[in-house]
Amino acid sequence: MSSPSKPEFILVPGAWHGPESFAPTTTLLEKAGYVVHGITLAAGNGAPRTSPPLSPNPSTSIQIPTSNRNPDIQTIQPDVDLIRATLEKVLSTGKNVVMLYHSYGSVPGTEALAPYLSAPKPGYGKVLRLVFCTAFVLPEGGSLIAALNNEPLPWFKITKGGELGKSGVLMRCDVKDDLVEPTTPQQIFYNDLSSTAAAPYISALKPHSYRTFFSQLTVAPWKTIPSTYIICTQDNAIPLPAQEGMLAMAGQMAPGSFDVVERVEAGHSAFISRPEVVVGILVGAAGGE
């Protein structure tokens, strides 16, 4: 059972992923007595590549369903609303929270904190720390596509709109229902897993709304809330120089931000390949309680 004094975790997955991808880490957190809330992103559209081989982790306390999934999601706001609803549910009980963001998850995940950046309401808990696991660090006005130099990555497969150049690269995106998928998920997300171990996670990936990558943030909570960054040194999705570059930018904009930086020898999904290490970092972020 969880201790009344323990903060609770809210885990926000990256694009294409669901909360079940955190299962190796979530299981260990629950065994340590923590309550964990997983978010199912609204921007993850459509069915998995095959029948889902990953069952929702039974130790995940809350998994928000997205019954209104549709290909017309054009902004991060539906994801922001889902994350904020979970925050409100937990904080309003007086419990403190540690946020874990993976990849894209930090974009709606930080925007969701906008109402909670001032002093907590009477009886509310507070957000103790943000943990970015090879996740995007964006300033106010920033967007994920701007962080990608306003170009889709070579491994993006974008469908249902846009105009392709001769090389097959998307040159223009003006259709609201564009979806994006990874063409080489084994190499990009799971390069530190065997093909057998990676297979069920690849099968569970879902298309993601490409238009969400263009949403601009209005807040940068990492400037004021204590934050941890988990650098994944073998990441092929957000390579090491990009992770270090974002941290350098953060240090220039808000000296003292990201007071804890951990380096993990892992690919993009350390919560799968190195769960014991990630859990150690998370427990430290929660105050080691």
Image (cartoon, rainbow, N blue to C red):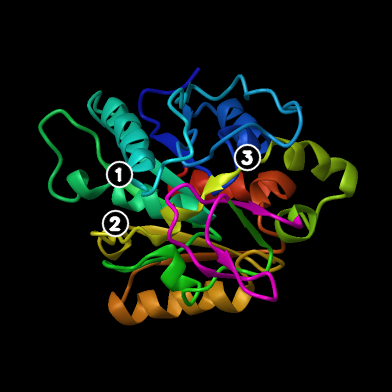
Q: Are marks 2 and 1 in contact (CB under 8 Å)?
A: yes
Looking at the image, is 228 positioned above or below residue 38?
below
x and y percent of residue 217 in the render? 29, 60
Image disc number at residue 225: 2
Asked whether 23 or 277 is in front, the reply is 23
Residue 100: x and y in percent read 47, 46
Figure check: 220 above or below 59 = below
| Image: 103 above or below 242 | above
Mark 3, Cα crowd under 10 Å, few <14 / some 14-19 / many 20+, is: many
Looking at the image, residue 211 sits to the left or right of residue 263; the answer is left
Question: Label 1, on which residue?
Answer: 127
Closer to the eye: label 3 or 2: 3
Residue depicted at 69% across the width and 64% down the height? 155
User: What is the magenta range?
Assistant: 160-184
Q: If you read the primary sequence from the N terminus, does the residue marked by circle 3 or circle 2 appear first?
A: 3
- Number of residue marks: 3
Q: Main secondary structure of the magenta part?
A: loop
Asked if residue 274 can be seen in this view, the reply is: yes
Q: Residue at x 24, y 34 (%)?
A: 125
Mark 3–mark 2 distance (CA, rounded to whole Å): 31 Å
Residue at image position (69%, 23%) is 55
Q: Which residue is mark 3?
A: 206
User: Mark 2 is on which residue type?
Assistant: Ile
Left or right of residue 96: residue 169: right
